[in-house]
C-alpha cells in the first residue's frame, strides 16, 4: 500500500483504486430477509442491486490495514430495510466503521445472543470488537455510505449469520425505523 491523504467523503475515497468490487443483488440475499413471500415477489419483478462494496484488501504482512467503502441502496423487502449480509470475524481482529452519507443502523450480536444497535450518521464512528457479528442497514431514503477499516488476514464467517440470522430485525414503522425481535433467530 502507498501513502495517501484524501478527504473523508464518499467522493474522495472512491478515487482510490479498489482491488475488488462486490455487488450484491436481491438474488444473492436468499434466506436473509424475514418475509420470504415479499422476497420472492420482489425477485420475480426484478433482481435489483442492494449494496456495493469496494474493497482494498491488504494482503501483505501483519502491519497493514484493509479498508472498504459500502453503499447500500435505499428500500425495503416487505417491511425490512435493505441491509448487508453481515458476518463475524472468525479470527482475531476488530473493525472501525465511519459514516459518510445517509442514515443507517449497525446491528451487532455475540454468538451467545447478546444484541446491540447503533445509529450511523455522517461524521459518526462505530467500533466493532472481535466476537461481535455485524450487519449494516439503510434506514433512510438516500444511499447510505460508510468506510470500514480492519486488520489484515481476517477470516470472514458468513455462514453463522446465514444460518441463524440476527436477534433483531430493522423494520419500516409508521414514523421511521422500528426494531423487532427476529422470530427465526437462534444463538449460534
Ligand atoms: C469487513 C466489513 C465490511 C463489510 C461490508 C459488506 O470486515 O465488515 O467492510 O464487508 O460492509 O458487508 P458483508 O461483508 O457483510 O457483505
Ligand atoms: Zn467485518
Image (cartoon, grey):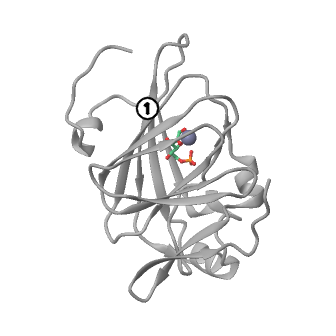
Q: Residue furthest bottom?
A: 174
Tell me: 55 left or right of 24.
left
Query: Residue sitting at 35 percent across and 52 percent down?
Result: 145
Tell me: 151 left or right of 92.
left
Measuring from the top left, give residue 96's x and y in whole percent.
Answer: 44, 38
Query: Residue sitting at 66 percent across and 61 percent down?
Result: 166
Confirm or reject: label 1 Cβ below 8 Å from ligand 1: yes
Estimate how packed mark 1 is, as few (under 14), some (14 to 19) or many (20 or more) residues with alpha carbons within 10 Å: some
Measuring from the top left, give residue 49's x and y in whole percent.
Answer: 48, 60
Can you identify the residue that label 1 sits on?
A: 67
Measuring from the top left, give residue 158's x and y in whole percent.
Answer: 69, 46
Measuring from the top left, give residue 176's x and y in whole percent.
Answer: 40, 80
Query: Residue sitting at 45 percent across and 49 percent down?
Result: 52
In the image, residue 184 sits, relative to residue 104, either above or below, namely below
Tell me: 111 left or right of 19.
right
| Quadrant in the picture for the N terminus | top left
Query: Residue sitting at 70 percent across and 35 percent down?
Result: 90
Q: Nearer the viewer, residue 63 or 69?
A: 63
Q: Residue furthest left?
A: 7
In the image, residue 70 sits, relative to residue 176, either above or below, namely above
Circle 1 sits in a helix, a strand or a loop, which is it? strand
Amino acid at each position: 500500500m502507498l501513502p495517501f491523504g484524501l478527504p473523508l467523503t464518499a467522493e474522495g475515497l472512491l478515487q482510490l483504486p479498489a482491488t475488488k468490487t462486490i455487488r450484491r443483488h436481491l438474488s444473492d440475499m436468499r434466506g436473509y430477509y424475514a418475509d420470504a413471500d415479499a422476497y420472492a415477489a420482489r425477485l420475480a419483478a426484478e433482481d435489483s442491486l442492494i449494496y456495493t462494496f469496494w474493497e482494498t484488501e491488504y494482503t501483505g504482512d501483519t502491519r497493514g490495514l484493509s479498508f472498504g467503502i459500502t453503499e447500500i441502496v435505499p428500500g425495503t423487502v416487505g417491511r425490512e430495510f435493505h441491509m448487508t449480509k453481515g458476518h463475524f470475524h472468525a479470527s482475531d481482529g476488530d473493525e472501525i466503521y465511519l459514516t459518510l452519507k445517509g442514515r443507517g443502523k449497525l446491528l451487532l450480536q455475540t454468538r451467545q445472543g447478546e444484541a446491540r444497535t447503533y445509529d450511523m450518521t455522517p461524521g459518526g464512528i462505530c467500533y466493532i470488537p472481535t466476537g461481535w457479528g455485524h450487519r449494516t442497514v439503510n434506514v433512510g431514503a438516500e444511499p447510505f455510505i460508510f468506510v470500514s477499516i480492519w486488520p489484515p488476514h481476517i477470516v470472514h464467517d458468513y455462514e453463522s449469520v446465514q444460518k441463524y440470522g440476527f436477534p433483531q430485525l430493522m423494520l419500516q414503522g409508521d414514523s421511521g425505523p422500528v426494531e423487532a425481535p427476529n422470530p427465526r433467530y437462534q444463538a449460534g
